[in-house]
Amino acid sequence: MSTTSEQRLIVGIDDSPSGLAALRWAVSQARSRQAQLVAVRSWALGLPRHGGLHHRHLAHPRVVLFFNGAEQRDASAKLVRDAFRIAAGDQPRDLSVTVRTPEGDPGAALISIAARDGDMIVVGHRHAPSWRAHRGSVSRYCRLHAACPVVVVSADQE
């Protein structure tokens, strides 16, 4: 059985109303449970957005000589800082907070991080069928694949 010091709340970060509501809920629960908060914002290179058609003037538009993902990780970390500022005034100093910016699909990234006993995933739920049809639902993916509890927060639950 896990003790409270081992509990982690792994929260998927985005700046949608439901994402911000999930972050507020996770901060409140981390305080009440004395749990660690792990804020996760994943990123992925997609050919249409990064290196596709707008680079036709180059001799070899699909050749990448060096890529380390630093720009994408920095943008993800900035989004996490902005989300904490909007949802909680700033990153809480009274909690143990870890920020993770892994490469990959958001659902898979959350599942891979939430691998310890005592972990719980917290995600927002968007009410936008066209978005889910295009990208899929992170909350649905987590509910179907997580080995730990998953809390889904919508903006209208506040």
Image: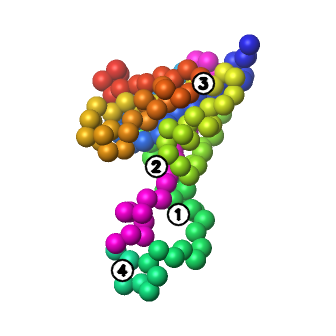
Q: Pick the quarter of the image with the C terminus.
A: top left
Dividing the picture into quarters, in which one does residue 124 lie? top left
Instruction: Describe the element under mark 2 as helix, strand or loop.
Output: helix
Give the mark nearer the N terminus: 2 vs 1: 1
Q: Which residue is pictured at 49% across the width and 30% down the height?
A: 142
Residue at the image position 73 percent from the left and 16 percent from the top: 3
Residue under numbered circle 3: 147
Is label 2 in contact with label 3 (beta carbons under 8 Å)?
Answer: no
Residue 41 magenta-highlighted: yes
Going by the numbered disc 1, the residue's amino acid type is: Glu
Q: Position of residue 115 (x, y in %)?
A: 66, 31
Mark closer to the chain start, 1 or 4? 4
Real-space Cα separation, disc 2 to disc 3, in angstroms: 27 Å
Q: Which mark is residue 79?
A: 2
Asked if residue 32 is positioned above or below residue 24 in the image, the reply reads: above
Q: Amino acid at mark 2?
A: Leu
- Residue topped by disc 1: 71
Marks 1 and 4, how far apart in space?
22 Å
